Image (tube, rainbow, N blue to C red):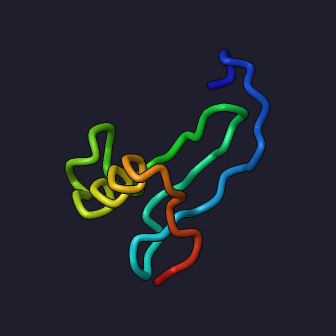
Amino acid sequence: MKKLGLPIKEDSSPWFHRKQVGGWTVVYDGLTFVTVRGAGHMGTTQPQQALELFNHFLANTNLPSKPF
């Protein structure tokens, strides 16, 4: 990410899947980097969190920033 040289707009913050941290996001200028907690590089070990991330991506909406 450093090699892209994009300035950080919002530093690392958690997103939530129900009542647990689903992962972390960092918002850059023109790019949002999102991780899925405990999922490895493909997201297959955390399918519910990965699906939530994918659904929010398709809907172009922000991930939940508070537990629900």
Q: Is residue 19 above or below residue 33?
A: below
Question: Is residue 31 rendered to the left or right of residue 5?
Answer: left
Query: Quadrant location of residue 4?
Result: top right
Furthest-top residue in view?
A: 3
Query: Which residue shows up at 32% across the image and 37% down it?
Result: 41
Q: Is residue 34 above or below residue 51?
A: above
Query: Quadrant location of residue 2?
Result: top right
Question: Is residue 21 rendered to the left or right of residue 9?
Answer: left
Query: Which residue shows up at 48% across the image and 70% down it?
Result: 16
Question: Is residue 5 rendered to the left or right of residue 52?
Answer: right
Q: Residue 63: horizontal and vertical position, in percent?
A: 50, 61
Query: Which residue shows up at 62% across the image and 25% down it?
Result: 1
Q: Residue 10: horizontal and vertical position, in percent?
A: 74, 49
Relative depth, front residue between 65 and 36: 65
Q: Residue 19: horizontal and vertical position, in percent?
A: 43, 82
Query: Which residue shows up at 37% across the image and 47% down it?
Result: 58
Q: Is residue 55 above or below residue 20?
A: above
Count of numbered labels shown in the rendering: 0
